[in-house]
């Protein structure tokens, strides 16, 4: 199968209503915002959702970075999954090729394989004994698909609500424990936009193909399905639009930055795209 033949840029437009789209654990799990109150959903968070949707739609074992509560191969760590999937090829010259063939997310986003090995062998030279220590391998794979963090178009308002429990989590139940109070935070309303690109030159190295790009295109409108939680109730977050630009060649007709600037989104989520000569765009509604 040939690698990606056309440069691709894309954009993701999301609406958040009374939900916490991406809590910050270093700030009491409040929704992530900048100093000027612009809301943020990190690229790591978006990739996690994309991997989960891919895992639901692809064959078992096709995703390398799996959530603990969604793992489908019995491996309890990335190191275990790498050893299981790569076997004695781990650290060999065929590691990158084998990893990219086996795992879709490695082929798309790349991956750093940093795995411990055994103890260092002691030097046999007289009076030159080295201390024991961990050794291992570190193999970096650079993927062709990049995804930016999503930022709100306008400053968002964060509402914090104090919550209590009506039952005690421990003891004999005669009195409430110290864990009966808490806080929940939410963004009242926000339109978020994220941009991404697919690079044909890097796709050659991993084997990322036109068919792989089509899979991501199909999954993006469903990015927020099966992702509900207490912080993100069903219906509180939705994909409004996916804008997909396909260039006529591997090098593209212009930079990704210029393509991304051609998109305009208003506060209600309405999308307007300024036409760029030689570039075809497709606007896809959310699922």
Image (tube, rainbow, N blue to C red):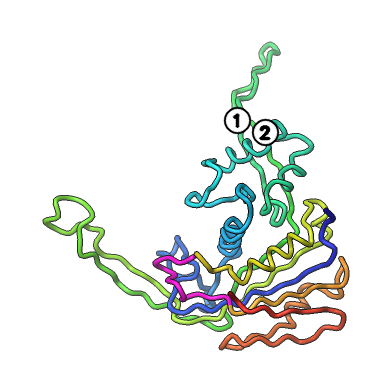
Residue 111 position, x and y percent, is 68, 50
The magenta segment is 227-239
**Magenta span has 230?**
yes
Which residue is at a point 81% across and 51% down the rendered structure image? 205
Horizontal side, residue 90 vs residue 187: left or right: right
Residue at image location 83% in from the left, 53% down from the top: 1
For the residues labelled 2 and 1, the Cα–Cα distance comes to: 20 Å
Within-10-Å neighbours for mark 1: few <14, some 14–19, many 20+: few
Binning the other alpha carbons within 10 Å of mark 2 as few (below 14), some (14 to 19) or many (20 upward) gives few
**What residue do we see at 63% from left, 51% from top?**
59
* Quarter of the C terminus within the rendering: bottom right
Q: Which residue is mark 2?
A: 87
The residue at which mark 1 appears reads as: 134
The quarter holding residue 281 reads: bottom right
Question: Contact (CB < 8 A) between labels 2 and 1?
Answer: no
In the picture shown, does residue 26 fall above or below 41?
A: above
Image coordinates of residue 98 in percent, x first then y, are: 74, 42
Residue 71: percent from the left, percent from the top?
53, 48
Which circle's residue, 2 or 1, is located before the other in the chain? 2
Q: Secondary structure at mark 2?
A: helix
Q: Is residue 102 magenta?
A: no
When asked about the image quadrant of residue 254, the answer is bottom right
Q: Residue furthest left?
A: 174
């Amino acid at each position: 199968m040939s690698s990606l033949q056309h440069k691709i840029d894309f954009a993701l437009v999301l609406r958040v209503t009374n939900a916490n789209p991406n809590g910050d654990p270093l700030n009491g799990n409040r929704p992530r915002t900048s100093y000027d109150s612009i809301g943020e959903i990190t690229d790591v968070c978006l990739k996690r959702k994309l991997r989960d949707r891919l895992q639901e739609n692809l064959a078992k074992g096709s995703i390398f970075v799996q959530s603990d509560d969604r793992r489908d191969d019995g491996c309890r760590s990335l190191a275990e999954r790498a050893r299981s999937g790569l076997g004695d090829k781990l650290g060999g010259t065929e590691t990158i090729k084998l990893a990219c063939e086996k795992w879709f997310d490695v082929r798309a986003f790349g991956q750093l394989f940093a795995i411990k090995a055994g103890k260092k062998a002691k030097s046999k030279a007289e009076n030159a004994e080295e201390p024991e220590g961990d050794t291992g391998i570190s193999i970096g794979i650079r993927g062709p698909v990049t995804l930016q963090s999503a930022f709100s178009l306008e400053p968002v308002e964060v509402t914090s609500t104090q919550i209590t429990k009506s039952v005690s989590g421990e003891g004999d139940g005669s009195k409430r424990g110290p864990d009966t109070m808490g806080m929940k935070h939410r963004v009242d309303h926000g339109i978020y936009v994220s941009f991404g690109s697919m690079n044909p030159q890097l796709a050659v190295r991993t084997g990322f193909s036109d068919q792989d790009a089509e899979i991501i295109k199909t999954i993006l409108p469903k990015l927020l399905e099966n992702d509900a939680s207490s912080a993100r109730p069903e219906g509180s977050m939705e994909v409004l639009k996916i804008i997909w630009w396909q260039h006529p060649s591997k090098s593209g007709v212009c930079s990704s930055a210029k393509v991304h600037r051609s998109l305009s989104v208003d506060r209600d989520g309405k999308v307007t795209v300024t036409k760029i000569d030689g570039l075809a765009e497709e606007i896809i509604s959310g699922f």
